[in-house]
Image (tube, coloured by chain):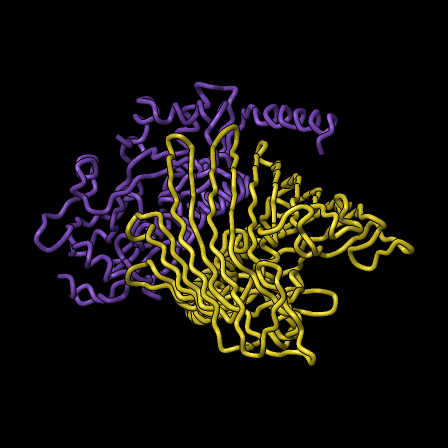
Chain colours: A purple, B yellow
Amino acid sequence: MKTTKFKIALILLVIMTIGFSFTAIEKVTVKGSDTMVILSQKWAEVYMKKHPEATIQVTGGGSGVGLAALINGSTDIANSSRPIKSSELEKLKSRYNTLGVEIPCAKDGISIYINKANGVSELTVKQIGQIFAGQITNWKQVGGVDAGIKLYGRESSSGTFVYFKDNVVKTDYSPSCQTLPGTAAIVNAVKKDKFGIGYGGAAYAEGVKDCKVKKDDKSPAYFPTAETIKNKTYPISRYLYMYLKSKPTGQTKAFIDWILSPEGQSIIAGVGYFPVK
Amino acid sequence: MKKIVLAVLLLSAFMAKAQDVQKDTIKTVSIDSLKETIDEHSMKFSALDERLATSDAILEKLAKIKISGYIQAQYEVFNYQDHIGPGTSTKASPVTNTFSIRRARLKFTYEALDGVKFVLQPEFAFDKVTLKDVFVRLNDRWLNTFALTVGQFDRPNYEVEYSSSSLESIERTRMSTILYPGERDLGAKIEADFDTKYSIPLKLQLAVLNGNFNLGTTSNQLKDVDNNKDVMARAVYSLKLPSKGLGIDFGAHGYFGTTQILAQTTPPTVFSDVNNNPFTPVVGDKLDKQWLGGEMQIYYDFLGGMALKGEYISGTISAATVNAAISNSTFSYNRVRDFKGYYAQFIKNVGAKNQLALRYDVFDPNKHLSGNTVTTAGDLKYSTWVFSWHYYFDDNIKISAGYTLPINETSTIVGGDYLKDKTDNTFTLRFQAKF
């Protein structure tokens, strides 16, 4: 153990360890949140035009899928529309011995989509929670017509599903809530269903109407706009995140720095979300 | 000519009229048959809808069952003095290398409702299937803070609870193997995680256990063998400094139990106490089995992630081979001892696919004696160096290589092989497939 050969081998190992740690990445993989996929693709498109040497590959699949890919090493950046769970953080710690890096990159208001023909125009956060929990089942209970409420939601790998459940529903979703693979599918379903209701990122609300949301019965109701999200009067708003397993270097760092720059942040509004600051 | 033209014209007129008549008939037939076809398809779609709804319901139930598992196949090379051990190796008939299956486990998790989880984890070997984890976990839905686990589960200790598929060093420490044989025990455990609801990064665990798991024969482990329950408590606080890329988890745990003498021989077997003095316990006597430990894990995001982990445990351990029911194969003596043990482990991630680990662990089964005052081999301190390298081939496959270098304390009184460090090193090459 105390031989010279052993000491030399140990020193060589340390040098190799430090040497191998420096790897330059030109291709950057981004995976995860469907809420963020359009925004992320736009960022990638604009960035690659300015930096032809870089290749940014963006795919969706849901926040849960993105974070799982980050943990198993198949993505450089995980997009997530919810904070990382403690169980995911433990897996990251176990695999990479880091706490991961959390970068809030945009803000989003969760819109409540209802059909344009629906007479209901505003709901409290509690009522929305009770609707999606299956405790309120008829539109007449919230001031609408006498018709059953049809629920449209996301799959459990979605960050929007988790965020909405933790912050609005606060219990299990109703078993009758139809699971759809993406916010666009929810919007489509509500557009065709006069008595449907769904939830998702504000950027996707085309062909349906946003329901005004009020904190409680006594508060005024607000639409999700840049102003109401910035001043926190809109009750259901959240950060959108990028997660990395360790401090970024090379092209990944350059891409993230650009996203957080005024130029990168100016693209957000065009997609329907809101700058992080 | 005129007659021919007239005949052709008349013929054409008839043909046209016939086609007109045919066209009118086809139109009527088409609309009716279209309506029938639509009705028929509509009924088929309704039937399909019903079948889909039934399949959806079944799929929803099946989606609640999660199956995971891993297989560890390995090749070991032994460098043992006189080729004695492990297994059947002897000086006359040495076995210096072998292939073996280290672990083959499946884990079934069923989330019946949000907050209710069933876990069943059997381990498969050539000649038997044993149960590793078998428990029901209830999470409180009101405060999102507490969880009650009942069944067979890992004892609350950092190294024990760390998944065997994720170990950074090729095997657990000697200390952990002796203090927590089999890692699991039967009992009930309450856990509180104050992070989710209160944003306080504190976890508390309190477990009440039978205390005889992996002691004695399998049949003696199915239920408690004495009327005493062992208690474990653990607290861990996580400090996060994300701007510095630094995370520090620190905590402490305690084990409070006894070893009850369930049987004695005739003439009675003499035990050895903490001062190496003989004593003769009788049936019903309870020997101390309790210790306290501290732990710390430091994570630092430097050139791709690294960690420094350590534990220190000190207390009193007791064992009784005179009881078949509670005989500890990793500490098979009739004695009570004040022990201490600790380890320090350095782990460095190299890029996304490589990981290096270096661990130094010590277990001193009798902290009152050292060197040439040690009188029995069972009281000799062991210090072990473990070097490990892991290569993550892909999402599911990990290749690990490890070299274990135990160094035993020497004693002239114990003598024999223990006049010097007895050679007992092992090289392990392990292939792990996990899903």
Depth check, front residue: A207 or A31: A31
- Residue A253 sits above or below residue B269 on the image: above
Choose top left, top right, bottom left or bottom right for residue B248.
Answer: top left
- Whether residue B271 is visible, yes or no, is yes
Q: Position of residue A245 (x, y in %)?
A: 48, 36
Q: Residue furthest left?
A: A218
A163 vs B320, left or right, is left
- Residue B134 sits above or below residue A9 on the image: below
Residue depicted at 69% across the width and 55% down the height: B375
Q: Position of residue B382 (x, y in %)?
A: 66, 48
Q: Residue furthest right?
A: B92
B393 vs A150, left or right, is right
Residue depicted at 43% across the width and 68% down the height: B112
Q: Position of residue B31 (x, y in %)?
A: 41, 65
Choose top left, top right, bottom left or bottom right for residue B244.
Answer: top left
Residue depicted at 62% across the width and 45% down the height: B169
Q: Position of residue A211 (x, y in %)?
A: 20, 50
How many circles with numbers are drawn on the protein? 0
- Whether residue B32 is visible, yes or no, is no
Depth check, front residue: B88 or B8: B88
- Residue B329 sits above or below residue A260 on the image: below
